[in-house]
Amino acid sequence: MERSNFSELQLQKLHQKEFLNDKDLEEIAIYQKKGIFSLRSELLLMIYFSIILFTSGIGVIVYNNIDSIGHLAILSANFILMLVCFYFSFKKAKGYANDEVLFENPLYDYLVLTGSLLACIFLGYLNFQYQIFDDSYAYVSLISAILCFAVAYYFDNRIVLSMAITSLATFIGISITPKSLFQNEVYSNLELTYSGLILGILLLIWMEYSLKHKIKSHFHFVYAAFALHLLGVCVLAGLVSDHWWVFIPILIGFVYYFYQFSYRVLATSLFAFMLLYGYFGVNIVGGRIISSIHFEFIYQFLTMLAPFYVVASIYLFIRLVKQFNAKKNASVQ
């Protein structure tokens, strides 16, 4: 069993609303005092890292022994391992359903992940060696995205869905990695900025459609998280471009939508990142406007005001997040 996250106040409110009787309340209190915790999450995390290390190890072995192993042998071994993973996954899967469908054993979720990673490696290596799509890897990314979307929806796997969205972004030329946030062409290439905006909006449209028609509606957080960061980065990139005024209504729409949506699904992380992107966006717009005003005393005044502004911003951010969490906690009580 996993340790309960309910506080004593929450338990008392559940008891007052007669969701819990006296015996249940006493048993929960005794259980919480034992301090029992579950190793399940820790073990699954170790399995996830094992899969990453395994696929990375395959890449290192291939790189160091490419001359002695041979390309065809590497492709064959990769393909066979991929087939084995998907064979056992299909064997244990319950089939597709619009609702959430889980494996009886969560280890098979990681088998699906391993098979998907091997499939992407196979496609990339196949194109690298035999130049099926010449020197372009865009089509490899597109095929990988289609494959991962199909696997994610059939096996109900959120991690593979993340891979699919990442591959789709790579297809249009956007790399979603921590390094790319600092060296991303999105900031210097306005075409990529618009492409990122279109992709982010399409993700939100599909997410809303899925929620309305209950097509894997539990995937909503994955779509929302990717769309939030993709749109946020692209909006900031647009605001530092020469046509920055075009992105002001987009910034307003971005903040308004994710403010409403984060309250709808009660996701603190979405709310916090929305505030951050909105804060940076407003400051960029403010800086643009101030830079167009050529009065020396205004710059001196703002320099004096800056420390107070930073402190007030931090206070307001913390206050808004606390208010959000209070409403979130009240909704589950």
Image: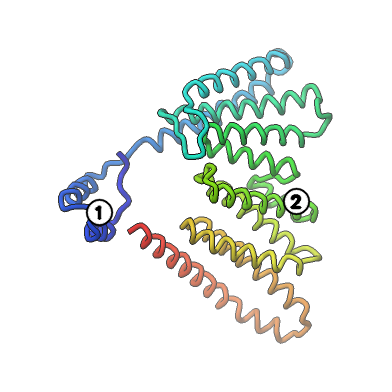
Q: Residue at image x 54%, y 19%?
A: 87
**Residue located at (38% from left, 60% from top):** 331
Q: Which secondary structure, mark 2?
A: helix
On residue 19, which mark appears? Answer: 1
Classify mark 1: helix, strand or loop.
loop
The one of 157 and 210 positioned closer to us in this rendering: 210
Tell me, for residue 195, which label it has, or none.
2
What amino acid type is highlighted by mark number 1?
Answer: Phe
- Of badges 2 and 1, nearer the viewer stands 1
Give the residue type at disc 2: Ser
Do labels 2 and 1 touch, CB within 8 Å?
no
Where residue 262 sits in the image (x, y, percent)? 51, 59
Q: Residue at x 81, y 34 (%)?
A: 136
Rendering coords of residue 287 (x, y %):
70, 73
Q: Position of residue 149 (x, y in %)?
A: 62, 36
Residue 303 - label:
none
If the image is split into quadrants, where does the C terminus sit? bottom left
Is residue 153 left or right of 173 when viewed as pictured? left
Q: In the picture, residue 104 is in which quadrant?
A: top left
- Classed neighbour count for the residue bearing mark 1: other residues with Cα under 10 Å, few (<14), some (14–19), many (≥20): few
